[in-house]
Image (tube, rainbow, N blue to C red):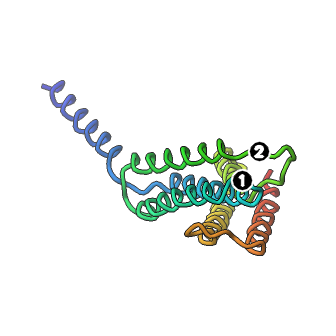
Amino acid sequence: MKKVILLSVLMVFGLALFSGCVTMQTWPDNERNAENKMVVIQEKIGDGLKTGSLSPDQSQMFLTTLKGIRTDYKELRDRRVYRDEWDKLLVRLDALGDEINRALDRPAKIEEPRNGDRIVSLQRRIDDGRINGRLPVTEGREFQSRLDSIRREYLRMTDEGRYSTHEERTDISRRLDSLETDLNRFR
């Protein structure tokens, strides 16, 4: 009799655990990852158009695809959804990024890192600092909040396929420099 009760209790806990895994929830890491990818893709399209590596038609095609992905992103953001919906969006962003990379002719000279690449790099440093315990909890939250603000502002500037101005890019770069300087204190 005890084995039956124990088996029943284990089955109930197993079902509760399983149902907790498949329930809908928010996915802030996937949201940040999608934002990072959209920033990098937007910059690649803009740089490709400026350097002539992408034709206006190619860049418009990529921007149209990105606009569709952004629309889907806005529908998923801050909502409780299944993880596979975010996974599908991220796969679409990866595919678009790969397609742009194939279309771009890489220049031979070494360029400064783009703001989008810097955002991704700083996100990794913040995540690593939190995981390794180098960043105290309060500073980690503050740095993450600042980076999220910079990322969202950059996305807003490039919304609807608009290219950011030199002043806007400089402002974002200055804010990233400040965040990076503050983050360097915790190495």
**Measuring 70% from the left and 59% from the top, which residue is drawn there?**
49
Q: Nearer the viewer, residue 187 or 46?
A: 46
Q: Is residue 150 left or right of residue 90?
A: right
Callout 2: SS: loop
Query: Residue 26 appears at what percent x and percent y?
Result: 42, 57
**Which quadrant, please, contains the N terminus?**
top left
Task: Kindly identify the amino acid type of the residue bearing the numbered disc 1.
Answer: Asp
Q: Amino acid at mark 2?
A: Arg
Task: Measuring from the top left, give residue 8's x and y in whole percent.
Answer: 18, 32
Viewer-side residue, 121 vs 154: 154
Say left or right for 187 vs 9: right
Image point (56%, 48%), residue name: 96
Q: Which residue is mark 1?
A: 117
Q: Quadrant of residue 156?
A: bottom right
Q: Which residue is mark 2?
A: 106
Q: Residue at x 63, y 72 (%)?
A: 157
Q: Residues within 10 Å of mark 1 (few under 14, many from 20)?
A: some
Say if 120 sits above or below 15 in the image: below
Nearer the N terminus, badge 1 or badge 2?
2
